[in-house]
């Protein structure tokens, strides 16, 4: 990936987070509501310090939890725009290569009603790649191993049934994982995925 492609991707990610945070501050707008006149930036993140947001989970009260893609960090952004690192995931062993991206990658994040965060970590290693959980005040813990040759990226929570759905960008699969942890089940697979 060239420097221009990385910069463009980073700019798009920052724009997506800013737009989502603006919706949090101003309230959800409908397609017929028109522009929101009092929209503002909630947080300015420093890309050179590794604050490259990949995904976001909104908090009650206007805050947000984000994954910083390549710094291995999960952070909370307060309604007044301050970013606090909640957890830094372990580094993979030397020489590890994450599929497609090369570097360790922190992807999708979702928030359960009790404040527990679930997120995806890809490292190219069987010891670290998978679904991770962070309970309020706790330490990050891997609850399900995913294939080391995959790139888990998108994450959705089915809170009613206690399931997580993981989209894998490298393997063209969607995995299903119980929120309590355990072995993943291939829920869907297709070349189009």
Image (spheres, rainbow, N blue to C red):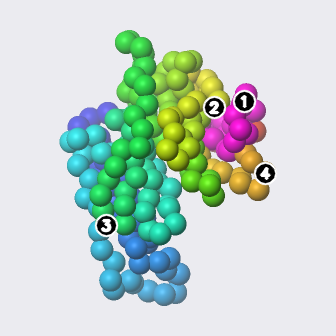
Which residue: 38% across, 27% down? 103
Q: Is residue 106 above or below residue 31?
A: above
- In front here: 145 or 166? 145
- Could you tell which of marks 3 and 1 lies nearer the N-terminus? 3
The label number, if any, that marks residue 161 in the structure image: 4
- Say which quadrant the C terminus sits in: top right
Q: CA distance from mark 1 to mark 2?
A: 6 Å
Which marked residue is nearer to the observer: mark 4 or mark 3?
3
Residue bounds of the magenta highlight: 164-186
Q: Which residue is mark 3?
A: 80
Q: Furthest-right residue in view?
A: 161
Q: Secondary structure at mark 3?
A: loop
Q: Categorize mark 3 by other alpha carbons within 10 Å: few (<14), some (14-19), many (20+).
A: few
Q: CA distance from mark 4 to mark 3?
A: 34 Å
Location of residue 77 by image quarter: bottom left
- Could you tell which of marks 1 and 2 lies nearer the N-terminus? 2
Q: Which residue is mark 2?
A: 143
Q: Is residue 119 left or right of residue 10?
A: right
Q: CA distance from mark 4 to mark 1?
A: 15 Å
Q: Is residue 175 left or right of residue 105?
A: right
**Can residue 90 be seen at all in this image of the molecule?**
yes
Q: CA distance from mark 3 to mark 2?
A: 32 Å
The label number, if any, that marks residue 58 in the structure image: none
Q: Are marks 1 and 2 in contact (CB under 8 Å)?
A: yes
Q: Which residue is mark 1?
A: 182
170 is within the stretch colored magenta: yes
């Amino acid at each position: 990936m060239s420097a221009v492609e990385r910069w463009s991707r980073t700019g798009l990610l920052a724009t997506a987070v800013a737009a989502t945070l603006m919706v949090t501050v101003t309230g959800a707008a409908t397609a017929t509501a028109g522009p929101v006149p009092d929209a503002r930036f909630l947080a300015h993140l420093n890309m050179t310090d590794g604050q490259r947001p990949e995904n976001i989970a909104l908090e009650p009260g206007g805050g947000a939890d984000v994954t910083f893609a390549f710094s291995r960090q999960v952070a909370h952004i307060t309604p007044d725009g301050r970013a606090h690192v909640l957890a830094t995931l372990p580094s993979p062993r030397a020489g590890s290569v994450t599929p497609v991206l090369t570097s360790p990658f922190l992807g999708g994040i979702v928030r359960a009603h009790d404040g527990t965060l679930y997120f995806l970590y890809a490292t190219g290693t069987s010891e670290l790649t998978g679904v991770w959980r962070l309970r309020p005040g706790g330490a990050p813990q891997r609850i399900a191993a995913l294939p080391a040759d995959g790139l888990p990226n998108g994450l959705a929570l089915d809170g009613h049934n206690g399931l997580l759905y993981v989209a894998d960008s490298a393997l063209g699969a969607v995995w299903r994982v119980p929120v309590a942890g355990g072995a993943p089940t291939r829920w869907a697979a297709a070349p189009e995925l």
